[in-house]
Image (spheres, grey):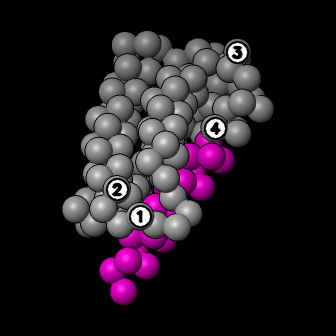
Amino acid sequence: MENNILILSKKLLVDLETAHKRFQHSKEEGARGDFHSEVKPFADEVKLSADAWRKSAGQWIRENNPKNLHANQIETAADYLEVISVQAFFPETSKKRFLDQIQSVEFILNSMIIAVEKARQ
Protein backbone atom coordinates (compact mmCIF):
# COMPACT_ATOMS: atom_id res chain seq x y z
CA MET A 1 0.00 0.00 0.00
CA GLU A 2 2.82 2.42 0.84
CA ASN A 3 4.39 2.00 -2.61
CA ASN A 4 1.01 2.69 -4.18
CA ILE A 5 0.60 5.88 -2.12
CA LEU A 6 4.07 7.11 -3.10
CA ILE A 7 3.53 6.35 -6.79
CA LEU A 8 0.09 8.00 -6.84
CA SER A 9 1.29 11.02 -4.84
CA LYS A 10 4.16 11.61 -7.26
CA LYS A 11 1.88 11.14 -10.28
CA LEU A 12 -0.60 13.64 -8.86
CA LEU A 13 2.22 16.15 -8.32
CA VAL A 14 3.04 15.81 -12.04
CA ASP A 15 -0.66 16.22 -12.91
CA LEU A 16 -0.76 19.32 -10.71
CA GLU A 17 2.20 20.81 -12.58
CA THR A 18 0.53 19.99 -15.91
CA ALA A 19 -2.67 21.72 -14.76
CA HIS A 20 -0.70 24.74 -13.59
CA LYS A 21 1.06 25.08 -16.96
CA ARG A 22 -2.25 24.66 -18.79
CA PHE A 23 -3.82 27.33 -16.57
CA GLN A 24 -1.01 29.77 -17.37
CA HIS A 25 -1.49 29.06 -21.08
CA SER A 26 -5.26 29.65 -20.79
CA LYS A 27 -4.71 32.96 -18.99
CA GLU A 28 -2.05 34.20 -21.42
CA GLU A 29 -3.92 33.18 -24.58
CA GLY A 30 -7.44 33.80 -23.26
CA ALA A 31 -8.41 30.51 -24.89
CA ARG A 32 -10.57 27.78 -23.40
CA GLY A 33 -9.58 24.15 -23.78
CA ASP A 34 -11.68 21.95 -26.03
CA PHE A 35 -13.95 19.96 -23.76
CA HIS A 36 -13.90 16.61 -25.57
CA SER A 37 -10.27 16.51 -26.72
CA GLU A 38 -8.53 18.22 -23.78
CA VAL A 39 -10.61 18.89 -20.66
CA LYS A 40 -12.50 15.60 -20.26
CA PRO A 41 -9.57 13.22 -20.92
CA PHE A 42 -7.31 15.10 -18.48
CA ALA A 43 -10.01 15.47 -15.81
CA ASP A 44 -10.98 11.78 -16.10
CA GLU A 45 -7.36 10.67 -15.70
CA VAL A 46 -6.82 12.92 -12.67
CA LYS A 47 -10.09 11.74 -11.09
CA LEU A 48 -9.07 8.07 -11.39
CA SER A 49 -5.71 8.76 -9.75
CA ALA A 50 -7.20 11.07 -7.11
CA ASP A 51 -9.86 8.52 -6.15
CA ALA A 52 -7.29 5.73 -5.82
CA TRP A 53 -5.02 8.04 -3.80
CA ARG A 54 -7.92 9.17 -1.59
CA LYS A 55 -8.74 5.56 -0.73
CA SER A 56 -5.15 4.39 -0.09
CA ALA A 57 -3.97 7.53 1.70
CA GLY A 58 -7.11 7.70 3.85
CA GLN A 59 -6.70 4.09 4.94
CA TRP A 60 -2.98 4.61 5.63
CA ILE A 61 -3.75 7.67 7.80
CA ARG A 62 -6.37 5.75 9.81
CA GLU A 63 -3.90 2.93 10.42
CA ASN A 64 -0.77 5.01 11.12
CA ASN A 65 -2.08 8.21 12.72
CA PRO A 66 0.64 10.57 11.46
CA LYS A 67 1.04 13.67 13.61
CA ASN A 68 0.49 16.34 10.95
CA LEU A 69 -1.89 14.70 8.48
CA HIS A 70 -5.59 14.03 8.87
CA ALA A 71 -8.22 12.23 6.81
CA ASN A 72 -10.11 15.46 6.07
CA GLN A 73 -6.97 16.90 4.41
CA ILE A 74 -6.86 13.90 2.08
CA GLU A 75 -10.52 14.42 1.16
CA THR A 76 -9.99 18.13 0.54
CA ALA A 77 -6.87 17.54 -1.59
CA ALA A 78 -8.63 14.92 -3.73
CA ASP A 79 -11.63 17.23 -4.21
CA TYR A 80 -9.37 20.15 -5.13
CA LEU A 81 -7.51 17.97 -7.64
CA GLU A 82 -10.76 17.24 -9.46
CA VAL A 83 -11.69 20.93 -9.55
CA ILE A 84 -8.19 22.04 -10.63
CA SER A 85 -8.10 19.49 -13.45
CA VAL A 86 -11.14 21.15 -15.03
CA GLN A 87 -10.61 24.81 -14.12
CA ALA A 88 -7.09 24.81 -15.61
CA PHE A 89 -8.61 25.00 -19.09
CA PHE A 90 -10.70 28.13 -18.55
CA PRO A 91 -9.24 31.66 -18.61
CA GLU A 92 -12.09 33.05 -16.50
CA THR A 93 -11.00 30.89 -13.53
CA SER A 94 -10.00 32.96 -10.50
CA LYS A 95 -6.20 33.07 -10.46
CA LYS A 96 -5.94 33.53 -6.69
CA ARG A 97 -8.27 30.66 -5.81
CA PHE A 98 -6.69 28.37 -8.42
CA LEU A 99 -3.16 29.04 -7.15
CA ASP A 100 -4.26 28.69 -3.51
CA GLN A 101 -5.80 25.30 -4.28
CA ILE A 102 -2.68 24.16 -6.14
CA GLN A 103 -0.48 25.23 -3.22
CA SER A 104 -2.73 23.41 -0.74
CA VAL A 105 -2.78 20.16 -2.74
CA GLU A 106 0.98 20.32 -3.33
CA PHE A 107 1.58 20.72 0.40
CA ILE A 108 -0.66 17.78 1.30
CA LEU A 109 0.82 15.49 -1.39
CA ASN A 110 4.37 16.33 -0.27
CA SER A 111 3.39 15.86 3.40
CA MET A 112 1.95 12.45 2.53
CA ILE A 113 5.15 11.41 0.75
CA ILE A 114 7.26 12.54 3.72
CA ALA A 115 4.99 10.78 6.24
CA VAL A 116 5.03 7.48 4.33
CA GLU A 117 8.80 7.59 3.81
CA LYS A 118 9.34 8.42 7.49
CA ALA A 119 7.10 5.53 8.59
CA ARG A 120 9.16 3.13 6.47
CA GLN A 121 12.38 3.94 8.32
Residue 62 disc label: 2
- Residue 101, which numbered label? 4
Residue at x-position 39% and y-position 70%: 116
Precedes in sequence: disc 2 or disc 4: 2
In the picture, measured across the screen, residue 107 lies left or right of residue 118, that is right
Q: Overall secondary structure of the magenta stretch?
A: helix
Frontmost of labels 4 and 3 is: 4
Q: Quick one: label 4 or label 3, which is nearer the N terminus?
A: 3
Q: Which residue is mark 1?
A: 65
Residue where numbered disc 3 is placed: 92
Magenta-colored span: 102-121
Vertical arrangement, residue 70 with respect to residue 83, above or below: below
Of the 4 image quadrants, the one containing the N terminus is bottom left
Binning the other alpha carbons within 10 Å of mark 1 as few (below 14), some (14 to 19) or many (20 upward) gives few
Q: In this view, which residue lies farthest toward the bottom?
A: 121
Residue at (39, 30) in percent of width and height: 42
